Amino acid sequence: MAGQGVQRREVLRMLAMAGGVATFPGFSKWSIACGHTGRAVTRIKPATYQPIFFTAPEYALVEQLTDIIIPTDDTPGAREAGVSEFIDVMASRDPDLRRNLRSGLMWLNSHSESLHSKQFLRLSPDQQIALLEPLAYEKKSRAGEEDGRKFFDRIREYTIMGFYTSKVGLTELDFPGLKFYSSSPSCPHQDDPEHLHLPPPQS
Amino acid sequence: MAKQIYDVVVIGTGAGGGMAIKTLCEAGLKVCALNSGRQLNPGEDFRNHRMPWEMKYRGFGDPKTHPPSQPGFVDTEYVTGAWELEVTYTTAPGTKWMWPRCSAVGGKTNFWGRSSARFGEIDFRAASLDGYDMDWPVTYDEVSPYYTRVEKMIGVASTVQNRPSNPDGSYLPPFNFRCFDMILQKGAEKAGVPYLPDRIAQLTVAHEGHPACHFCGDCTSGCEVGAFFSTPWFLLPKAKATGNLELRTNALARSILVDENGQAAGVAYVDRSTRHEREVYGRAIVVAASCVETARILLNSKSRHWPTGIANSSAQVGRNLCDHLYGTSASGYLPQLVGQPSFPDNVGDNSISWMPRWQNLKDPHEEKFIRGYSVYPDGGCFEFPSYHDQIEGFGSSFKKEMKRKYPSTVSFTVQAPTLRSDSNYVEIDPQVKDSHGIPVPRIHFQWGENELKMWEHSQQVCAEVLRSAGGVLEDAGDEPEIPGYSLHETGTCRMGNDPKKFVTNRFGQTHDVANLYICDASVFLNCTDKSTTLSILAFALHTSEYITQQFRQGEH
């Protein structure tokens, strides 16, 4: 259709107008942590982030926890996505979250002290994971650690929120939205409506 | 200076107000439209094309100012300052009511869900069929031509389906089914439930000068190209082009002014930008402020002629409040799609497919409840993977499972109508006033037995559809959303032939005050299982042409 091309161009022009990317002072990683591979990201040396709410030791602990929850493996993780920055920003605007996280971090360190006579960050990676597992998995849960479980739920939730709203996280999922499609995307398996014969899934 | 008198003053610029404004202006009448909030600028205010990381709080909104009592779509970072947070309301003890209101020009049409099914004879004559309440004062054959004209104006994508509860209209090509639709459709077939393309006011092809949808999938944050119906994109520009419209923004209506005979003479309002009290005069007044707000304005319009509120001699203004019960009646995932590549499955944001009312069609008392409900399935690759709650733990295994599950999740939203009830209504709170000194509405509302039976029924059926499709049910939905969430309030100024029992006649003209009209869902007898906007548009068109006729006959 002749008219269609003009309209499409008009649409694209309007999209371009609306799509200005804002940058915010104080965030070192959000706008740059956009590589598809871990290698591309680690080449960038971001400026050191200055936490708004957390103290330096608290912030280091938050960063380590987010890294354990969504680690850097064959794809980038929470660290590259700047998740701890996101949590710091959200906490700085939310008194309830501030209270919960601060008391939770204290609980974690005192729990670590009582088990290993060391603060959490001084434990070996295996010890850190062993300490968190009872907080994260129902089958491994132990009496007396209810406060810790609540805290872990909270920091896990905010790690997920921060990671899957970052460019790294949505690249990980291969988010297909906010693109321009010329027709309504359609199921590509019309000959297999029940989808019983798809190619083998990714492991 | 002689005071200016407009032909018509219209309160509200949403679906009903927008249609009235356009129709009246095109008929050559001088219209002053009042809108309680600001004008949006789509290029600036609609940030639906921003990725979450391009916003300071990732689209969740500033935790310090985001209202915790409101649903997620209110005042996120995608649109700011469009939703009403200042003008308050109260709830009676025991009532839970969530009342998101969009005060920007265009109202909720800026962000609506776009599902656009016609009401049918089964709805208009429901009382005759099952003996509950009263029939509408119109027949489907009378309303049908208005639906046809509205569908042509706004563009509705769907298919002809020949369903007894859902009269067909004239449609643009439908949205295509996504992978999960194909799978669920097979499941629905086995469960004996229809699974079809929804009726959705979204342009699958360019239509009447509006561009086709580009399927980005973030419709409910507003569309900056106007590829789905909203009054600022579709109706208000046409009204403006006539030169007959004056639009006043930040104009919060306080009450209807009356003349010495008790007829409507104008509207008293607050200019919210200066906090000054203002008046505007018209030969006829159209109230289209949305159901609860319209009742508030009428009830607050007390005078010696109308001691209980204007047009309220029936004592029915504010009564009969109905709403749609909304809830996720089942959610889970389809193992067939686990680990498959992501697919643009969130294209239409929602409402691409539906399970239109299939209950009580042959016999109105077939089920344990009367009337019926519809279901909207949804799923696929959303912007945010909210299924994270279903995956335990942390580490690489968690991260991999999140990715594998991404294309596979599905859920079912039920839309079930409440029946009218004496205990569900709006009144004016005798004590509380908002920050402009306007007495606020107080809402009385509880779910009734009939709609709760529909909710239970929908949980069982949706679970069966999911299981029959080979899916895994993860959550059967504990409770429905709290009332008000659907934004589909109806019934506070019902239409009917008997002036003792109804507020308006079948034309939306109030029985008591001949030059006062209602153009929103408050005139509906009840809410049916269908969404309200298309019908608001059709009835508002009907009413507006009747008003025009009254002017031509010298009545106003």
Image: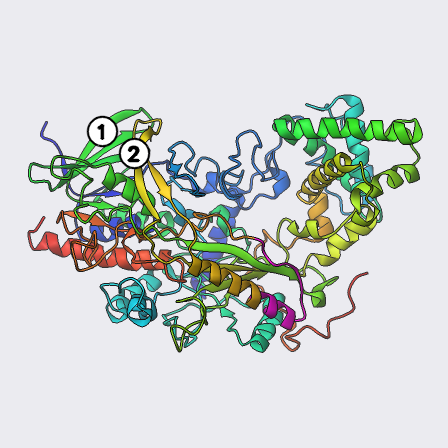
- Report the amino acid beneath label 1: Arg
**Horizontal placement of B374 versus A93: left or right?**
left
Above or below, comparing residue B103 to residue B197 in the picture: above
- Report the amino acid beneath label 2: Ala
Specify few, some or many for label 1: CA neighbours under 10 Å numbering under 14, 14-19, or 20 or more: some
Q: Which residue is mark 2?
A: B251
Q: What is the x, y in percent for residue B397?
A: 82, 51
Q: What is the x, y in percent for residue B126?
A: 32, 68
* Residue at 34%, 54% in the rendered image: B421
- Residue B449 lies in the magenta stretch: no
Asked if disc 1 and disc 2 are in contact, CB closer than 8 Å, the reply is: yes
Highlighted magenta segment, given as a residue range: B462-478
Q: Chain of mark 1?
A: B
* N-terminal-most mark, 1 or 2: 2
Q: Quadrant of the C terminus of chain A?
A: bottom right
Above or below, comparing residue B175 to residue B82 in the picture: below
Q: Quadrant of the N terminus of chain A?
A: bottom left
Q: Which residue is mark 1?
A: B278
